[in-house]
Amino acid sequence: MPRISIGDVSLQVVIQGEGEPLLLVHGFPLDHSLWKHQIAHFSRSRRVIAPDLRGFGQSDVTPGTVRMEQFADDLACLLTVLGIERPVCLCGLSMGGYIAFAFAQRHRERLRSLVLCDTRAAADAPEARKNRWETAERVLREGPGFLAESMVERLLAPATRRHQPELVAEVQAVIRAAPREGVAAASRGMAERPSVDELLPRIDLPTLVVVGEQDAISPPEEMRELAGKIPAAQFVPLADAGHLAPLEQPAAMNAALDRFLQEQDLEWRT
Ligand code: MLT
């Protein structure tokens, strides 16, 4: 897994396969392994790029606050350093979706299409913002262990927690290993993100909106509404999945993404 310098930080990045570029952006407080099934499947026919974001996984950490705009600029810089000039399909989950919105606002010319998984357009309510600040303080004091315990119920569907104990352990291990300053910085950054509700009708890209039907963090009804505001969006709910649909239901996730990407390939050729 190469380490790529993008200026003030180096990112650990999976780069696998050849073809149209597919950029996979993980959520909080995870790393590229969220996409392990998509990397295995799509790298057979595409160039898959799956970084650990600044402050996560094996990538460098910067303390303070890391805003969604900074993550988006990191990704644009990564594409430049990798020499990827063709517009990409950017697929982001949850915080990765917040970053996708910032990327669409700042680097629209680098996008061919968008996939928004289990994410939200609304800014945080004041109470949620306060919780983010408290999480940042607590994670700096104690490390991310408490998040591994408290988040799993909201990240994974009840059936996943019952029938896939190894997946529960895997997700918890990734959270426990997350760098505390990176988690705190992203938590503060998410607290500061604005609503992108106004942006949605102006997204002029083919867009796939995917959500686990049991997502407790970005509920399906909210995501259906989000999809309804984007002119060229398709909405696909996935059964028996929670917030981490790509890990919980990889076959269904890959099928939905495959269909969407193949439509783009056809349009591209005609
Ligand atoms: C994520 O999965 O990235 C987080 O749940 C996002 C959030 O806390 O809003």
Image (spheres, rainbow, N blue to C red):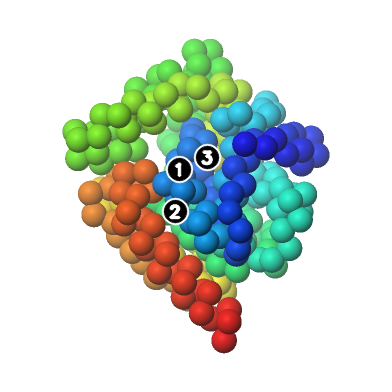
Q: Quadrant of the N terminus?
A: top right
Estimate the x, y position of residue 97 in percent, counting from the top left: 51, 52
**Distance from the alpha carbon under mark 1 to that under mark 3:** 7 Å
Give the residue at x 57% y 74%. 204
Of pointers 2 and 1, the one earlier in the residue sequence = 1
Secondary structure of the residue carrying tag 3 is helix
Name the amino acid type tagged 1.
Lys
Give the residue at x 51% y 66%. 200
Q: Closer to the camera, 85 or 104?
A: 85
Q: Mark 1 Cα within 10 Å, few/some/many (few <14, many 20+)?
A: some
Position of residue 41 in the picture relative to residue 49 (left or right): left
**Distance from the alpha carbon under mark 2 to that under mark 1:** 9 Å
Would you say residue 184 is visible in this rendering?
Answer: no
Q: Farthest residue toward the bottom?
A: 270
Estimate the x, y position of residue 256 in percent, counting from the top left: 37, 63
Q: Quadrant of residue 211?
A: bottom left
* Contact flag, marks 1 and 3 (Cβ < 8 Å): yes
Q: Farthest residue toward the right?
A: 7
According to the image, label 1 marks what residue? 36
According to the image, label 3 marks what residue? 32
Q: Quadrant of residue 233?
A: bottom left
Q: Mark 3 Cα within 10 Å, few/some/many (few <14, many 20+)?
A: many
Vertical placement of residue 260 versus 165, above or below:
below
> Which-is-in-front pick, marks 1 and 3?
1
